[in-house]
Image: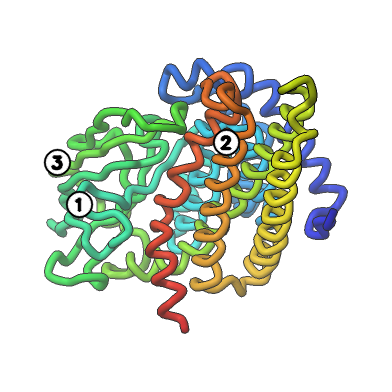
Amino acid sequence: MIPRTLFDADLDGFRDSVRKFLEQEAAPYHEQWEKDGQVSRELWQKAGELGFLCPTMPEEYGGAGADFRYSAVVMEEVSRAGLSGIGWTLHSDIVAPYILSYGSEEQKKNYLPGMAAGEIITAIAMSEPGAGSDLQGVKTTALKDGDHYILNGSKTFITNGQMADLVIVVAKTDPKEGAKGISLLLVETAWEGFEKGQNLNKVGMKAQDTSELFFQDVKVPVTHLLGAMEGQGFFQLMQELPAERLQIGLTAIAAAEAAWQWTLDYVKERKAFGKPVIKFQNTRFKMAEMKAEITAARVFTDRCLELHLERKLDIPTAAMLKQYTTDLQCRVMDECVQLHGGYGYMWEYPIARAWADSRVQRIYGGTNEIMKEIVARAF
């Protein structure tokens, strides 16, 4: 086995704490959360008390001032446990960095401490019914009217959409422009005209509240613009997307590793024709092939994590990582379901849930076809 040299004893201890917390506070309730379509707010608050939310935020804003490895541990453990309803990664490692990087001091003080405590749950609203990976095509508008923007439009496929108290909304402040007309706004969900639509009925990730959002003449104070001036939204999105794609890669490999281990345990116990399934050459070869691919992808992912810690992870490399690891994740899940036989198709088996959950990884964060286009443009 190739050791992971990025993680020291302190991080190993942190990983144990996260794993035990998830085993006690999340795993026993996840089946009910799948029926509810969302996890509990209590889980968020307990996680906040233990420092599992926004660990990379500076202490002055309620975080631990830790490096990104601590966030990586949290997202890996959530993914490894198959707890796909927990939307901490988007909250802690996508929304919070936007506010920290581009927000005013007032915005940081107003929101980051509550986010770290699990008292404020957040989302980011990019996708629309007619615009997914093509962010320049958004139709939602935020037109300036005195000391407010008037926000109109709709969003869909929004993670944490039902539970969110605060949403970063991607909108056109200048509808005549393409990328240069996009801005990011901090919008509180309690404001008049902000409506949460249905909690979408997805193929997988049943416990994750993924929703439609609607804005009808929502008055957003100009002080809630994210950044020094209008029209910076597309640049801000492009700057932060490599980190998001790294996060998807980290969760993809953690999920693949877990599925491989579940399958190994199963084929050692399950018997066919009087002997354990692992004794068949096809089974051993399939397990060996997956192990080799997962190991190679893990090394690539950890190297990208190192580059991110050094602030050197570029857009094409992050795109390659996202495309490669999520394609691999889906292949591994499919092979593992096959090796489970009929039981692999039963919802009560973790592999069935993981198989259903994995498919969207090739879609969000930019589809894998878009990832290939990004890589090709860098040739």
- Work out how far the residue at label 2 is from the one at label 3, CA to CA, in angstroms: 30 Å
Question: Mark 1 falls on what kind of element?
Answer: loop
Residue 121 occupies quadrant: top left
Residue at far front of view = 273
Residue in view at x 83 percent, y 41 percent: 13
Q: Is residue 157 left or right of residue 371?
A: left
Q: Position of residue 131 (x, y in %)?
A: 24, 55
- Work out how far the residue at label 3 is from the one at label 1, CA to CA, in angstroms: 18 Å
| Badge 1 density bin: few <14, some 14–19, many ≥20, Cα 10 Å | few
Labels 2, 1: front one: 1
Question: Mark 2 falls on what kind of element?
Answer: helix
The answer to whether residue 53 shows anywhere in this view is yes
Residue 163 occupies quadrant: top left
* Amino acid under disc 3: Gln
Residue bearing mark 2: 117
Q: Position of residue 186 (x, y in %)?
A: 34, 50
Residue in view at x 69 percent, y 66 percent: 303
User: Vertically, is 225 above or below 123?
Assistant: below
Closer to us: 331 or 64:
331
Q: Is residue 175 left or right of residue 184?
A: left
Residue 216: give its label. Answer: 3
Labels 2, 3: front one: 3
Residue bearing mark 1: 130
Residue in view at x 65 percent, y 60 percent: 301
Residue 349: give its label. Answer: none
Question: Mark 3 falls on what kind of element?
Answer: strand
Counting residues from the N terminus, which is met first, the one under dot 2 or under dot 1?
2
* Amino acid under disc 1: Gly
